[in-house]
Image (cartoon, rainbow, N blue to C red):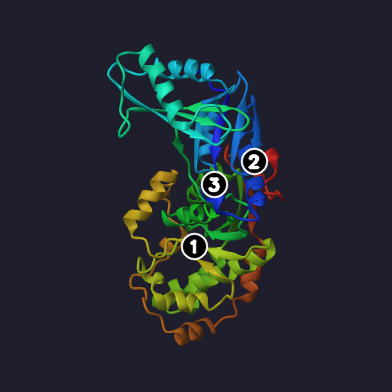
């Protein structure tokens, strides 16, 4: 079957009211970015749905794969746009059915938004179904659990026909929900957290804490690859790599061993808080999961959060590990995350970290050294790169939505 359009359904966007136009406009831009540099298409969007008009040179399967990964797209279908005549519908229904196996069942599903069309919904179903049975007597009708559904939509401008609905990622278009800074460790959880907030329309930049020689270049490359996988959904992501060795060594000089994990997280958050303000973000995102490790108890979170007034988003807070692993596998980050290149938190984990730190003791240990100058130095020496979905790396580009990155 040679299709001439791809139908893009909005899903959750249809619930938006007066600002729906803004969401649709952003989604259209994101779809166009996802399709670059492919050829043979034109994107047309209206209030209710989007159509990708195709030319013969279009690679429809590649296009559908790309569009299905765009946040805000609920589902897609390859469709035929027909003139508004029953003869055209009969002809193409027969073409759909000719590829079905002998003995298969089918159903004709009709939506008739053009109430002035000469035939009513049930009449169209009976007429088209009859034509299919005439052309292929080995088929039979099953309206409950058919092997195939031929869908006919009678709209004001034309009749559209298709027999496939491909689920997409859903959510809201990235770029409609503000900007956040993702604390990207290299483990399983944080990339999933990043994908979860992007699914809600939020743009992310990422920050990673690198402590050479205790952490290797392989660990850094692992984080870059995780960023690239996330960028497949949005085009490009800016990654800030913080030189953290000096800060981390000083923590281990002045802080009691059991509290070093707590202080390490606090220093990371102090640095992240400075970067948040530099990039104009509205919140910090991390992959914390309540009770998973010592630093993720409520008392630990309280002690760590005390260094910032910036909102901390934890989209994985109440999930169990199996749910997080399942999500990581679905988005394609799991195999990279489990590569044996440890981050700075793992390398320096004490044998017996405190799980319920006393806030006063944290302050007492850290008061033995003024970390502010060291933190500023780490921020001043951040390496910032922009990573796109093709694994091209661009040094400190100013616009993460630059079309040249696609």
The residue under label 3 is 71
Q: Position of residue 190 (x, y in %)?
A: 46, 57
State the CA–CA distance, disc 1 to disc 2: 36 Å
Q: Residues within 10 Å of mark 2 (few under 14, many from 20)?
A: few
Residue under the image location 58 percent in, 37 percent down: 390
The residue under label 1 is 286
Q: Position of residue 177 (x, y in %)?
A: 60, 58
- Near-viewer residue (184 or 402): 402
Residue under the image location 38 percent in, 12 percent down: 135
Residue under the image location 59 percent in, 43 percent down: 48
Q: Position of residue 169 (x, y in %)?
A: 48, 44
Q: Residues within 10 Å of mark 1 (few under 14, many from 20)?
A: many
Disc 1, SS: loop
- Near-viewer residue (87 or 63): 87
**Disc 1 versus disc 3: nearer the observer:** 3
The residue under label 2 is 46
Q: Quadrant of residue 133?
A: top left
* Mark 2 touches mark 3? (CB < 8 Å): no
């Amino acid at each position: 079957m040679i299709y001439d359009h791809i139908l893009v359904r909005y899903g959750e966007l249809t619930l938006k009211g007066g600002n729906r136009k803004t969401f649709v406009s952003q989604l259209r831009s994101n779809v166009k970015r996802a399709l670059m540099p492919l050829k043979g298409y034109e994107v047309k969007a209206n209030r209710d749905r989007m159509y990708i008009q195709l030319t013969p040179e279009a690679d429809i399967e590649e296009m559908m794969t790309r569009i299905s990964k765009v946040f805000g797209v609920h589902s897609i279908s390859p469709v035929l746009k027909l003139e508004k005549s029953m003869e055209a519908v009969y002809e193409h229904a027969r073409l759909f059915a000719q590829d079905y196996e002998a003995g298969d069942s089918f159903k004709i599903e009709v939506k008739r938004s053009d109430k002035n069309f000469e035939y009513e919904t049930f009449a169209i179903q009976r007429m088209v179904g009859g034509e299919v049975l005439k052309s292929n007597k080995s088929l039979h009708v099953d309206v409950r659990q058919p092997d195939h559904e031929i869908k006919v939509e009678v709209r004001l401008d034309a009749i559209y026909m298709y027999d496939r609905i491909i689920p997409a990622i859903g959510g809201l278009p990235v770029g409609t929900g503000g900007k956040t800074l993702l604390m990207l460790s290299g483990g399983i959880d944080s990339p999933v957290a990043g994908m979860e907030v992007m699914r809600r329309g939020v743009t992310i930049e990422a920050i990673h804490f690198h402590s050479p020689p205790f952490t290797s270049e392989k660990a850094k490359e692992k984080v870059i690859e995780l960023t690239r996988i996330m960028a497949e959904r949005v085009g490009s992501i800016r990654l800030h790599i913080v030189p953290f060795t000096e800060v981390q060594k000083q923590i281990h000089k002045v802080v009691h061993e059991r509290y070093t994990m707590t202080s390490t997280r606090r220093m990371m958050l102090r640095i992240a808080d400075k970067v948040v303000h530099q990039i104009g973000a509205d919140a910090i995102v991390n992959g914390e999961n309540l009770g998973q490790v010592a630093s993720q108890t409520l008392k630990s979170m309280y002690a760590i959060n005390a260094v910032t007034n910036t909102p901390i988003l934890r989209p994985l807070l109440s999930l169990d590990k199996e749910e997080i692993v399942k999500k990581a596998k679905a988005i394609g980050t799991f195999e990279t995350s489990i590569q044996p290149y440890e981050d700075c938190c793992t390398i320096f984990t004490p044998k017996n970290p405190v799980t319920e730190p006393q806030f006063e003791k944290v302050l007492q240990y850290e008061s033995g050294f003024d970390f502010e100058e060291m933190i500023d130095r780490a921020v001043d020496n951040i390496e910032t790169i922009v990573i796109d979905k093709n694994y091209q790396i661009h040094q400190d580009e100013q616009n993460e939505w630059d079309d040249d990155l696609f």
